[in-house]
Image (cartoon, coloured by chain):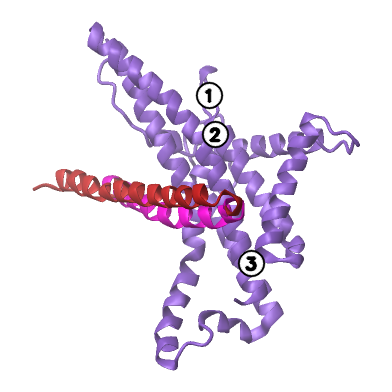
Amino acid sequence: MDLASAQVIGAGLAAIGAGAAAAGVGNVFGSFLQGALRNPSAAAGQTTTLYIGFAAAELLGLMSFATAMIILYAR
Amino acid sequence: MAAEAKIDPMQQFQIMPIGSDQLVATPFQFTNSALWMLIVFAAILVFMWGGNRRQLVPGRWQVAVEGMTGFLDNITRTSIGPEGRKYLPWVFTAFVFILFSNWIGAMPFGIVPGLHPFTVTSQFSVTLFMSLLSFAIVLGVGFWKHGLHFFSLFVPHGAPLPVKFFVAPIEFISFMVRPFSLGLRPFIAMFAGHVLLDVFGNFVVQGLNAGGPLGYAISMLCFVAVIGVSALELLVGAIQAYVFALLTALYINDAVNLH
């Protein structure tokens, strides 16, 4: 296998992480909604925590994107 | 029929000097990045000055500015505590700069021929510098207030000694990675969004070039997708600015209050 095709395959494999991060971010917001609909009065105070969780889950997806780009465009 | 329309989504991130097409190895060149940074700065100035009227019954503009300052004041006060006011200037600066450069970079200025909008935050050097500044503030405040006692940040309270022994290096690594993760977040969010927009925009043009009912259908579909992604991009730009401000405030809180 030559380098170019290996790069493309590797970038595609690295992009799987973006889907996993999508599941993670969806889980963060979904769980927040579950809790917030049961106790709406407590939800407003927890948005900060919500966004911290969102940022932590999202970062790994962004990193998988960065990895894919580095693999694809690295010489 | 366009010949060989090659998709090169990376071209939009190239830093080029204004007026020529060659980067020369001199440190002083007025690049498109510098130009758009100035435009962002001018937009922020106009926004803040326009809302700085101090009327008793505020107009819409003043409400926008006051809402933004109140929002960030709230972030610093709730996450740092009563002395969070001192750190509001940097948190506010970071938030407003990231928000305005994200949004100005996502505006469709490209419909004017020859005008190439440039997202300042799509360069890692810019966002990394901002996050390193946050990190420097954390280190400075921590060592200034607590001296060498600042290192107790890495050691959990009340844990048995073997656990402390294991957790301290992990905490240290997670602390040292913070500036990179903090700077990477706004950068990659903008970068990925603009690559996506570029790819869908290319599909629109290629569908039109291919012609036929299928080509037009694909072109139409991708045009709708471009609109959706643009809206998402505005949302993501705001969220990333908020996350940067929030995490900066939380990291400063670590340094001020030490757990």
Residue B256 at x, y percent in the picture? 67, 73
Nearest the eye: B198 or B234:
B234
Name the residue located 52 percent from the left edge and 37 percent from the top edge: B235
Is residue B177 depicted above or below A64 in this figure? below
Looking at the rendered image, the disc whose residue lies closer to the viewer, 3 or 2, is: 3
Across and down, in percent, residue B150 comes to 61, 81
Q: Is residue B181 above or below residue A9?
A: below
Say which residue label 1 marks: B108
Q: Kindly indicate whether the residues beneath marks 3 and 2 are on one polypeptide chain.
A: yes
Please state which amino acid type lies under the numbered disc 3. Answer: Ile
Q: Position of residue B158 (x, y in %)?
A: 52, 88
Shown colour of chain A: red
Q: Give the crowd class for mark 2: few <14, some 14-19, many >=20 residues within 10 Å.
A: many
Q: Colour of chain B?
A: purple
- Residue that appears at 26% across and 12% down: B215
Question: Dot 2 lies on which element?
Answer: helix
Let me know if marks 1 and 3 both belong to one chain. yes
Where residue B78 sits: x, y (%)?
A: 68, 60
What residue is shown with label 3?
B252
Are dots 3 and 2 in contact, CB under 8 Å?
A: no
What SS does tag 3 mark?
Answer: helix
For the residues labelled 1 and 3, the Cα–Cα distance comes to 36 Å
Q: Residue furthest front?
A: A38
Q: Earlier in the sequence, mark 3 or mark 2?
A: 2
Compared across the picture, whether B158 is left or right of B256 comes to left
Chain for numbered disc 2: B
Q: Which residue is mark 2?
A: B105
User: Which region is colored magenta?
Assistant: A43-72
Question: From mark 1 to mark 2, how far is it between C-alphas?
Answer: 8 Å
